[in-house]
Image (spheres, rainbow, N blue to C red):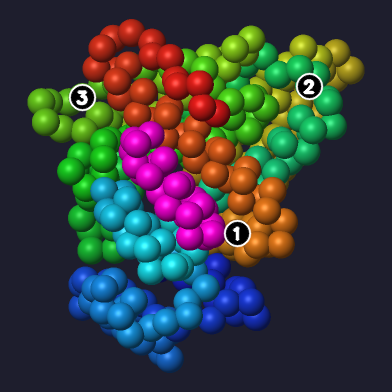
Amino acid sequence: MAENGHVPALKALADRISVVAVCDPLPARLEAARKHFPSAKLFSSAEALFGEVHNLDFADIATPPRFHFGDVKNALEHGVNVLCEKPLVFSHAEFEQLRALAAKKGLTLFTVHNWKKAPPLLKAREIIAAGTLGEITHVELHVLRSQAAVTADGKNWRTDPKLAGGGIMADHGWHNFYLACVLAGKMPKRIDVRNNIPAAGQAENESSCHIDFGGSGALVFLTWRSPVRKNHILVYGTKGLLEIRDNEVLTQTPQGVTVFDSGEKLSGGSAHPTWMKLSLEDFLDGFENRRLHAENLREALACVLLTEYGYKAAASGRAETLPATI
């Protein structure tokens, strides 16, 4: 994700961003970084980087999820704003600790929510904002994959709960949780989850999440055992419905059916550098328009709570009420 998503976005914004240092514990990945940023200093540890490179504007963190809390905390403690890949963290307690630290230091904590910037989602949000669907009553997001995405070395840490923090709900859940909130136009109240775990100790490979927004609801269905690769989104309203079939956005109202072709499939890849660039622009613009940072932090809190209490619901077999903090 760092090389295929973040790097192209950083290069595309070279007029606003200069990459001066890269950290990775793996020599092969540092060599890859050298090819992309030949003038940047390379480090095998964050401590070495922060010890030598000063006056950084921000750190872009794209490590496996289980390292995010420590990596983000370390950057904030060194007085550096943070842009972090999803999922930010896995517990409300960790989130509040990082949020408090960022506030104390007067720094920004921003999570990559690049799926909001996908062309089909941008069109859908435009249609919803125009009032075409009326009041939103139900949202569904279906993510169909045959397996978890593999890394550049051919390994699959996403199926290792110790590194990924879970299975498909940890990997795909975050993006779809904030999309559910954005499309519904509300913050969640309760969540009920049923996961399929192939064997004891393994990560879930399928997850069905039911979210209650209070007056409306959402279904987020995620699977790594589909015969086809596809993303399918439904939004129901009091005046009409909207459907996203990968690249197509379809609306149906009593006046008829309209189809828009965004030209880009949601399931077309894993890195999405063009979406990443738009998300990175929100991060940069947020230093002047603080609303963008506040909105992102609120969405991140919703995702943290849905993830943490979603796993609790899956374990208990009953719906869990989220803390009244959103």
Under mark 2, the amino acid is: Leu
Asked if the stretch drawn in magenta spans residue 199, the answer is no
Sooner in the amino-acid sequence: mark 2 or mark 1: 2
Left or right side of 157 for 149? right
Q: Which residues are magenta?
A: 87-111
Position of residue 67 in the picture relative to residue 244 (left or right): left
> Does residue 319 appear to the left or right of 277 in the view shown?
left
Q: Which label number is shown at residue 133? A: 2
- With respect to residue 320, does 152 lie above or below? below
Q: Earlier in the sequence, mark 3 or mark 2?
A: 2
Q: Residue furthest right?
A: 255
Quadrant location of residue 122? top right
- Residue, disc 3: 197
Given the current orientation, which residue lies at the most extreme left position?
200
Query: Residue 35 location, x and y as percent?
Result: 38, 85
Alpha carbons under labels 1 and 3: distance apart: 36 Å
Reading the image, the residue beneath label 1 is: 283
How would you rate the neighbour count of disc 3 (Cα within 10 Å): few for under 14, some for 14-19, many for 20 or more?
Answer: some
**Residue sitting nearer the eye, 249 or 99:** 99
Residue type beneath disc 3: Ile
What SS does tag 1 mark?
Answer: helix
> The N terminus is located in which quarter?
bottom left
Residue 95 screen position, x and y as percent: 40, 42
Q: Can residue 227 be seen in this snapshot?
A: no
